[in-house]
Amino acid sequence: MFRDIPTVLTSEELIDKMFRRAKKVEVAYSKNRLLMERNLSIAKIYTARDVAVSTLQKYIDSFPYVYKLHPFYRTLIDLLVDINFYKKSLSSLKWASGRIDLFASKYASKIKGAGKVEEILKFRKEFYGRAASIIKDIGPQLKYLNEARNIMRKIPDVDVSEPTVVIAGYPNVGKSALVERLSSAKPEIAPYPFTTKGIVVGHLDVKGRRIQIIDTPGLLDRPLKKRNSIEKQGILALKYLAELIIFVLDPSETCGYSLQEQKHLLSEIKRDFKTTILVVENKSDMVKTNSENIKVSAISGEGIRELVDAIVEHF
Ligand SMILES: Nc1nc2c(ncn2[C@@H]2O[C@H](COP(=O)(O)OP(=O)(O)O)[C@@H](O)[C@H]2O)c(=O)[nH]1
Ligand SMILES: [Mg+2]
């Protein structure tokens, strides 16, 4: 998703790149020194301008316009990078690019009117000075955008257009086993900035449709009151993604949590999420209750077809 955002150069690096390229510019030899210096200086100025304008434009184009993003991504970016500064930084790049373009035209026309070689060289130097100082002015913004880029690259690649199921439940109830059982291919781990474990993304292919299944280790597996605020917000971002939550209970209690504790977490998630919650009792090969919940065994495969039907019915 955000993997294509390029590294953002520092102001020093960008200035260096501009002048290095300008230095290499050559023009056809002419006996008329004035004419030759004029052509050369204008060509150098335009080259430096082109490097600056195209580099800055590349940055402007590759950072996403936050308000066009899916709310899941928008929420994450809002948490991870300061959106206000993000927007301001991109507009200052636009500003800088426009200023350099303007000065390039201005100095090119001054050079066209110059009658002496010294004058031409003075104008060229003046343009270089101005262009460099404009780039220096946006130094903090360039630096910030590069940091934002490094953070944004860690945002997981999930398909926000696919119908999505998020799995919740205490550790060891069998969430991973269930995602694996439901997925047609091996689920992939995507980094998620709010947990060291990453989220697990699998896909259920059924009746010509594809449903994304996300397991969130470390997120929806313990009471919310034990969370710090950043974790809570990371969990909230999931709200925008989850169209259905499968809450996994382990009535065998071999997970190490009593059924009562597990149901308590369920009621908490019910309270916090407005999403439909499908309650599933796993490990039916060990224990079966007489509740109304769907009963499955991720290990033996028992009840899985019924679960798939219930998922499909929801979408
Ligand atoms: N008997 C039995 N064991 C299961 C079942 N599903 C998961 N397990 C076991 O429970 C443990 C925890 O499973 P895991 O999928 O890692 O749970 P998670 O922490 O919720 O992701 C593992 O040892 C699994 O083999 C099941 O349906 N039946
Ligand atoms: Mg797991």
Image (spheres, rainbow, N blue to C red):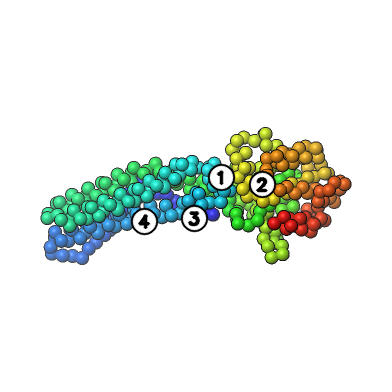
Dot in front, 4 or 1: 1
Read off the residue under disc 3. Answer: 4
- Which residue bears the numbered disc 4? 54
Q: Are discs 1 and 3 less than 8 Å apart at CB?
A: no
Rendered-image quadrant of the C terminus: bottom right
Q: For the residue marked with disc 3, what is the amino acid?
A: Asp
Whole-angstrom CA distance, mark 4 to mark 3, is 17 Å
Chain-order first, disc 1 or disc 3: 3
Q: Are marks 4 and 3 in contact (CB under 8 Å)?
A: no
Q: Are marks 2 and 4 in contact (CB under 8 Å)?
A: no
Q: Amino acid at mark 4?
A: Ser
Which residue is labeled 2 in the image? 216
- Distance (Cα) linking label 2 and label 1: 17 Å
Q: Nearer the viewer, residue 30 or 109?
A: 109
Helix, strand or loop for disc 4 = helix
Type of the residue with mark 1: Thr
Q: Secondary structure at mark 2?
A: loop
Q: Tell me where residue 76 appears, x and y as whole percent.
A: 56, 45
Q: Position of residue 69 (x, y in %)?
A: 53, 51
**For the point 56% across and 45% down, which residue is it?**
75
Precedes in sequence: disc 2 or disc 4: 4
Between label 1 and label 3, give the one nearer the viewer.
Answer: 1
Q: Mark 3 to mark 2: distance in Å?
A: 25 Å
Residue at 74% from the left image edge and 52% from the top image edge: 178
Check if mark 2's residue and mark 1's residue have beta carbons within 8 Å. no
Mark 2: few/some/many CA within 10 Å (<14, 14-19, 20+): many
Q: Earlier in the sequence, mark 4 or mark 3?
A: 3
Badge 3 vs badge 2, beta-carbon distance below 8 Å: no
Q: Of residues 111 and 40, which is closer to you in this image?
A: 111
Q: Is residue 105 left or right of residue 73?
A: left
